[in-house]
Amino acid sequence: MITKDLNNAKEVLENCGIIGLPTETVYGIAGSAFSDEAIHKIYAIKNRPFENPLILHLADKDQLSALVTHIPDEIEILMKTFSPGPITFLLPKSKKVLDSLTAGKPNVAIRIPSHPVAYQLLSELEFPLVAPSANPFQRVSSVTAQQVEDYFSNDELLILDGGQTNYGIESTIVGFENGRVTLYREGFITISQIEKVINTTIVNKTQSKVVEAPGMYKKHYAPNCEIIIARDIMREIERWKDKNIGLLLLKPMINQLVPFSISLSNNGDTKEALSNLYNALHSLERQKVEVIITHLFPNDDYGNIINDRILKASYK
Ligand code: TXA
Ligand code: MG
């Protein structure tokens, strides 16, 4: 059920229940970070493997010192610059953080969201919230309350409506390894933005073969149909002509050829396209297309992030 009633959401959370939570990146499925029961409900509803840990969400930095044992200087600088906002930090956890939340790992992922509804809720609760993205395991994250409802319609999940999310893509995840800032997942905050702030290069582990932070699972972010990354769009349209095709393009091109066709930015702006990507995948899925034909996006900061997501979505 979708609601705007904060008190209703609070009551569910205070009783170890879980809710759909709007944030500025994507919707989350939130529960008390101090409740094993809530954490288990989150894993269960998402059908998520237990080795994949959850992000802990705080109202502000004041709560941080109780939850982590150390904050490296570079991370502190990044936090000052980008938090509250679409970035998550992996930091060494204190004893207060439940093992079920970090999947037994020594670090805890911490994010301070900037969404006004998330902030309001977090600041009124006596405990922080864990919140993975609000989608079944390996499916596209949700950017509206309705998309969450569509995924979990059988689960009687209360979903707090905060409108469509601003950024439309998950948070960037960074940590600190061997004395260097390390990137585990690219999101709206890019590598260049981070490097500019700390004035040095970072280690990019987003393509790492070892699943350390499973935005790193090979298949991920996938709609429930085939995704074809075409070299020659016209040829693919011809090849799949007997199927219900959806076309996903950077800018308006040959949209009239296919009934379900979405261009992510009128003037080819990859930043705008990134923000619109998940919503577009949800729309195509709702049209029950059988195959999505798309292309590689331009090789720039935001285009590369889109490519990362569509490559993972197309992985079989
Ligand atoms: O924007 C976001 O980050 C959204 C909103 C709801 O805040 N949340 C989100 O959560 O995307 P999720 O669970 O879908 O993705 C979190 C990623 C996972 O790939 C997980 O493996 C990684 O963060 N992660 C969380 N805690 C970790 C830890 N302690 N060590 C390593 N990786 C961790
Ligand atoms: Mg996710």
Image: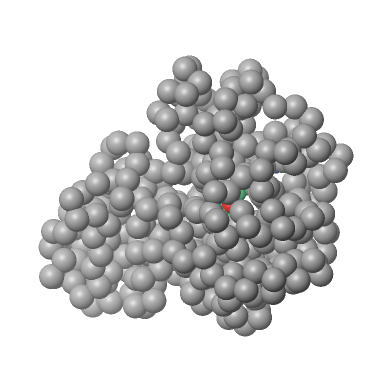
Residue at x 44% of width, y 64% of height: 164
User: Residue 25 in the image: x percent, y percent?
Assistant: 49, 53
Residue 181 appears in which quarter of the rendering? top right
Left/right placement of residue 94 relative to residue 307 reads right
User: Residue 228 in the image: x percent, y percent?
Assistant: 31, 59
Left/right placement of residue 305 relative to residue 133 reads left
Left/right placement of residue 108 relative to residue 3 reads right
The one nearer the camera, 209 or 121, is 121
Residue 26 seen in this snapshot: yes
Q: Quadrant of the C terminus?
A: bottom left
The one nearer the camera, 128 or 300, is 128
Q: In which quarter of the image is the N terminus?
A: bottom right
Residue 286 appears in which quarter of the rendering? bottom left
Which residue is farthest right? 95
Residue at x 64% of width, y 20% of height: 73
User: Residue 183 in the image: x percent, y percent?
Assistant: 53, 33
Residue at x 50% of width, y 21% of height: 198
Residue at x 66% of width, y 81% of height: 156
User: Residue 138 in the image: x percent, y percent?
Assistant: 54, 60
